[in-house]
Image (cartoon, rainbow, N blue to C red):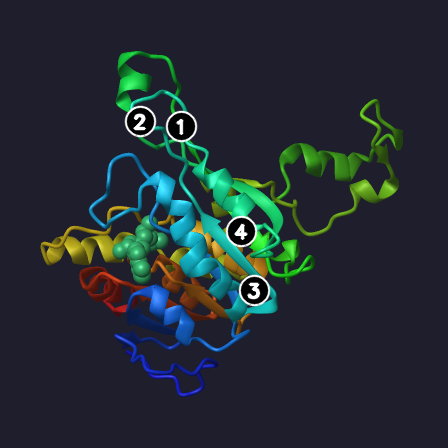
Amino acid sequence: MANNNRFPVRFKNYKPYYKTKFGRAFLADSIEFIRSLPEESVDLIVTSPPFALIKKKSYGNESSSDYVQWFIKNFAEEFMRILKPSGSLVIDIGGSWKQGSPTRSLYHFEMLLNLCSKNVGFHLAQEFYWYNPAKMPSPAQWVNIDRVRVKDSINPVWWLSKSENPKADNRRVLTPYKASMKKLMKEGYNEGLRPSGHNVSNQWGKDNGGAIPPNLLCYNEIIEMMQQDNLLEIANTISNDKYLNKCKENGIRPHPARFPLLLPLFFINFLTEPGDVILDPFGGSCVTGEAAEAAERFWISSEINEEYVFTSKYRFMAK
Ligand SMILES: C[S@@+](CC[C@H](N)C(=O)[O-])C[C@H]1O[C@@H](n2cnc3c(N)ncnc32)[C@H](O)[C@@H]1O
């Protein structure tokens, strides 16, 4: 794997498990590891922490009730310290059901309120929802057997920022205009006040190079976004397939809770520029690293389970 002497962050007491041109992957407990990172050295933390699920996953979860305190105590202040003032924290956090009850846990909202409390100090820049229609109906008791709940098909994703004005540019994540918008741009608008109160000016018909995406992130729309300009190349070079094939070849069970690659990639493009530093402290199979590598951002991944770190190398192998 490539060596890069110009890595923008210095690591005290930790040696990477492996390096790539833009990345450093560590086998470490992030509770300790992030304490060793310099102040204001990271532009974006994008991560999916172990969720507080009813059924414990093989990679270990804190129970719902302890989860928020565990996260706040061990990570929140350190995240604030290592982020640059213009930096952001993006957390993909699965919702959860209460044990034995067809009602939802509020832990992810508690987590949000705690992260944005005076003690911690994050700002809620915007909430996003990742729409995954392929999610399994669960818990089966309420959805498939008693039929009293419907399929849960979104993951909340909190975009939090250290300051009120984090680095962000939605021009880096535009999606192609829909046919109806193209028609309007060609044929023009009726300017004036709408019943909704919006005042439609002649600026609405201007071609700005693409549509601003909504905060409901859908796989197909992100694929369309990737088809814009230079992002097409990235979309073509990344996929979970190489990782999955190599795991299969070597008889290894793939990581059970991987990100969709497009999720970190969307935020990396939206919130950072080439040369910025991205951290995933719950690195898992290093999907964030792969997305950052493709987008030419420096990345740091830290993961506590050696098998996950070892197999994450598959993502960066030539074949
Ligand atoms: C939801 S998974 C992340 C999956 C990852 N986003 C991917 O796409 O492969 C959470 C990961 O956090 C790891 N983890 C849990 N506690 C940790 C800790 N204290 N330090 C580092 N990693 C930890 C788990 O082993 C697990 O791989």
What SS does tag 1 mark?
loop
At label 2, which amino acid type do we have? Ser
Q: Residues within 10 Å of mark 3 (few under 14, many from 20)?
A: many
Closest to the observer, 243 or 210: 243
Which quadrant of the picture is home to ligand 1? Answer: bottom left
Residue 235 spot, x, y in % from top left:
43, 55
Is the C-beta separation of discs 4 and 2 under 8 Å?
no
Q: How much space separates mark 3 and mark 2, taking CA atoms?
A: 35 Å
Asked which secondary structure carries label 2, the reply is: loop
Instruction: Tell which tag, 1 or 4, sits nearer the viewer.
Output: 4
Q: Which residue is mark 2?
A: 138
The location of residue 153, given as percent across then percent down, is 41, 31
Residue contact at pointers 1 and 2, CB within 8 angstroms: yes
Where does label 1 land, which residue? Answer: 152
Nearer the observer, 78 or 284: 78
Between 311 and 282, the one nearer to me in the picture? 282
| Residue at the spot of label 3 | 272
